[in-house]
């Protein structure tokens, strides 16, 4: 991570905390103290070796336990693959991390100091958690360039978007992201005319414009051609290290290409964790998932 990216992340936390502080009608000592602490910590603290930490998380929907004593953690720069049968709770886990669903109990931390359960969905995005849903959501009538530019504008960290001008630093960033997602040659094409795979890459590019520390990707290669899937694998391998990634996928050959550590979810909790080889040879995993 560059000092500049660190600085931007720090500024986000300060902005959120200032907004919070200004919304508080009463000034309690405890609140002031915690404000000062967060203000000082300034960035995602990964000194304990974790960018994301879930412990004993539980969620029920009308009495049905979708997430059941779930504990998972992700190391900084890691590319974690998550597999599991339909209904295992994979999407719900992402809903919890991104603040879309609040768990009934448990802990969810970004680094060791940011308690994500205290933040709303937009605030969590501002803190540096980017999410890619399965369906591509790009602006079809806008060009590739305009889509990326828009993603930069909606980054609240960029001040006064009304008077937004693409200065050289930002256009450098845009060019860098264009190269990463390999859409340089499509830059002035309407997003609506891109292939399904290209739309998915563009949306990932839009997330990258927001400098996410952690990227959550739900079934990113679903519906892609084999060639597009192979290029997506390459893309994820280039993102690893610079970002931390959590990838949910059913495509096992894709998982085999990108995976280091694999988490198998079943019935809302971790059934097995290890290399793909280890989990593929785990009797319980074969029974509930792979053997089917
Ligand atoms: N908002 C909701 N209301 C009720 N049930 C839900 C809701 N979201 C998910 N579920 C249920 O929780 C279980 C886990 O779903 P999900 O997280 O989507 O699984 P996966 O992504 O692993 O296929 C499923 O049985 C699903 O029907
Ligand atoms: Mg799902």
Image (spheres, rainbow, N blue to C red):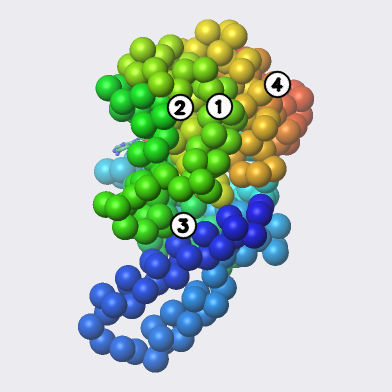
Mark 4 CB lies closer than 8 A to ligand 2: no
Q: Earlier in the sequence, mark 1 or mark 2?
A: 1
* Label annotation for residue 202: 2
Mark 4 or 1, closer to the camera: 1
Q: Residue 77 placed where, x, y %?
A: 67, 45
Residue 53 placement, left or right of 166: right
Q: Marks 4/1: CA distance?
A: 18 Å
Where residue 66 sits: x, y (%)?
40, 40
Sooner in the amino-acid sequence: mark 4 or mark 1: 1
Depth check, mark 1 against mark 3: the one in front is: 1
> Which mark identifies residue 127?
3
| Label 2 – label 3 distance at C-alpha | 22 Å
Measuring from the top left, give residue 147's x and y in whole percent. Answer: 37, 32
Q: Is residue 203 left or right of residue 212?
A: left
Dot 4 or dot 3: first in sequence order is 3
The residue at which mark 4 appears reads as 257
Which quadrant of the picture is home to ligand 1?
top left
Q: Which numbered marker is on residue 181? A: 1
| As drawn, 132 above or below 2 | above
Tag 1: Cα neighbours inside 10 Å, few (<14), some, or many (≥20)? many
From this view, report whether residue 10 is shown above or below residue 252. Answer: below
Q: How far apart, in angstroms, are the residues tagged by discs 1 and 2?
A: 7 Å
């Amino acid at each position: 991570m560059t000092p500049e990216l660190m600085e931007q992340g720090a500024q986000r936390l300060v902005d959120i905390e200032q907004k919070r502080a200004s919304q508080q009608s009463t000034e309690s000592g405890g609140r002031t103290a915690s404000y000062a602490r967060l203000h000082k910590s300034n960035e995602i603290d990964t000194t304990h070796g974790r960018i994301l930490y879930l412990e004993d998380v539980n969620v029920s929907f009308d009495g049905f336990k979708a997430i059941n004593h779930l504990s998972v953690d992700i190391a900084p720069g890691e590319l974690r693959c998550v597999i599991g049968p339909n209904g295992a709770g994979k999407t719900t886990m992402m809903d919890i991390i991104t603040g879309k669903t609040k768990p009934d109990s448990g802990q969810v931390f970004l680094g060791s100091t940011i308690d994500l359960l205290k933040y709303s969905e937009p605030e969590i995005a501002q803190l540096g958690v980017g999410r890619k849903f399965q369906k591509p959501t790009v602006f079809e009538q806008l060009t590739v360039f305009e889509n990326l530019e828009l993603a930069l504008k909606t980054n609240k960290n960029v001040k006064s978007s009304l008077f937004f001008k693409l200065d050289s630093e930002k256009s450098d960033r845009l060019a860098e992201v264009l190269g990463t997602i390999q859409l340089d040659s499509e830059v002035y094409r309407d997003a609506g005319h891109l292939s399904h795979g290209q739309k998915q890459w563009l949306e990932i590019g839009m997330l990258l414009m927001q400098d996410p520390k952690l990227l959550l990707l739900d079934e990113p290669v679903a519906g892609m051609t084999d060639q597009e899937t192979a290029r997506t694998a390459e893309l994820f391998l280039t993102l690893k290290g610079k970002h931390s990634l959590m990838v949910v996928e059913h495509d096992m050959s894709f998982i085999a290409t990108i995976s280091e550590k694999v988490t198998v979810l079943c019935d809302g909790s971790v059934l097995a964790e290890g290399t793909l080889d280890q989990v593929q040879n785990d009797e319980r995993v074969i029974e509930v998932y792979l053997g089917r």
